[in-house]
Every structure is written in structure tokens, then in C-alpha cells.
Image: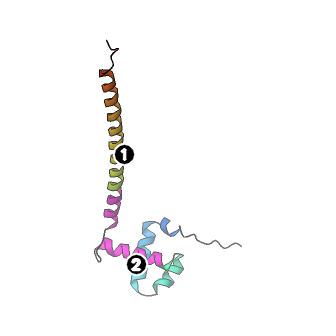
Amino acid sequence: MIALERSPFDACCQPPEFRRRAVDLARSGDQPVAKIAADLGISESCLRRWMAVDDVDSGRREGLTSTERKELVELRRRTQVQAMEIEILKRASAYFARQNSAQNTDPAGP
């Protein structure tokens, strides 16, 4: 029988309920964090990161909450799109300005 090894990407794909329960287990203090992480098939650093994120989200620690972080990512994405749109409009405006000035200076006009 072939033993399946977990890839490092498996931890990020765990459902929120799994993460919450893993953090609760680690916080209970019954076993070391390293043992709990190994039993769950995730790395110790992953579980500690989940615990740190939970600390921020629950207000026990300073930092951006998960909701604030998602909002920041969305706002940065919108800003980037708007900057691209502005650049396109600038180029279109310059193009039409050149077209308009070329028509006004055309001596063979009507």
C-alpha cells in the first residue's frame, strides 16, 4: 500500500472549521503544538500562524484582521484597475487631440 504524503499546499486548503478546531486544540494546552500539528497532518508553523491570525481576529493582538486584510487587497486591486483605466483614457485623449489638431490644420479641408 502506498502512503500518501500531504503537500505543503494542503494546509491552506483546509476548511475554516478545521482551522478553528485545530486552534482550539492547540489552545487547550493538553498536548504540545508540534504534536497536535503532526497528528492533524499540518506543519507546526502552519498551526502557529493560524493561532496568530486568530489572536488578531479576536482582538488579543494588534494587527490587521482577516476581514481588514481582504478589504485592503480588494482596495489595492481596484486602485490598480483605476490607474490602468486612467492611463488608457490619457492615451485616448492624446490620440483624439492629435486627430482634431490635424483636421484643423489640414489646408485641403472643405
Quarter of image, res 22: bottom left
Residue tagged 1: 84
Query: If the image is split into quadrants, where does the C terminus sit?
Result: top left
User: Residue most toward the top?
Assistant: 110
Residue 7: percent from left, percent from top: 57, 69
Quarter of image, res 23: bottom left
Residue 57 lies within the magenta run: yes
Q: Secondary structure at mark 2?
A: helix
Q: Tell me what residue is drawn at x 37 percent, y 76 percent.
A: 52
User: Residue most toward the right?
Assistant: 1
Nearest the viewer among 79 and 74 is 79
Residue 6: percent from left, percent from top: 58, 71
Residue 14 lies within the magenta run: no
Residue 18: percent from left, percent from top: 45, 70
- Of callouts 2 and 1, which one flags the residue occurring earlier in the amino acid sequence? 2
The rendered magenta stretch, by its main secondary structure, is classed as helix
Tag 2 near tag 1, CB within 8 Å: no
Crowdedness near tag 2: few (<14), some (14–19) or many (≥20) residues, C-alpha within 10 Å: few
Query: If the image is split into quadrants, where does the N terminus sit?
Result: bottom right
- Residue 74, placed above or below residue 27: above
What amino acid type should be assigned to the residue bearing mark 2?
Asp
Q: Residue 24: which numbered mark, if any?
A: 2
Q: Which residues are magenta?
A: 45-73
Q: Tell me what residue is drawn at x 36 percent, y 73 percent.
A: 54
Q: Secondary structure at mark 1?
A: helix
- Residue 76, placed above or below residue 86: below
Quarter of image, res 2: bottom right
Please name which of the two marks, 2 or 1, marks the residue nearer to the observer. 1
Q: Residue 95: which numbered mark, if any?
A: none
What amino acid type should be assigned to the residue bearing mark 1?
Met
**Horizontal side, residue 75 vs residue 11: left or right:** left
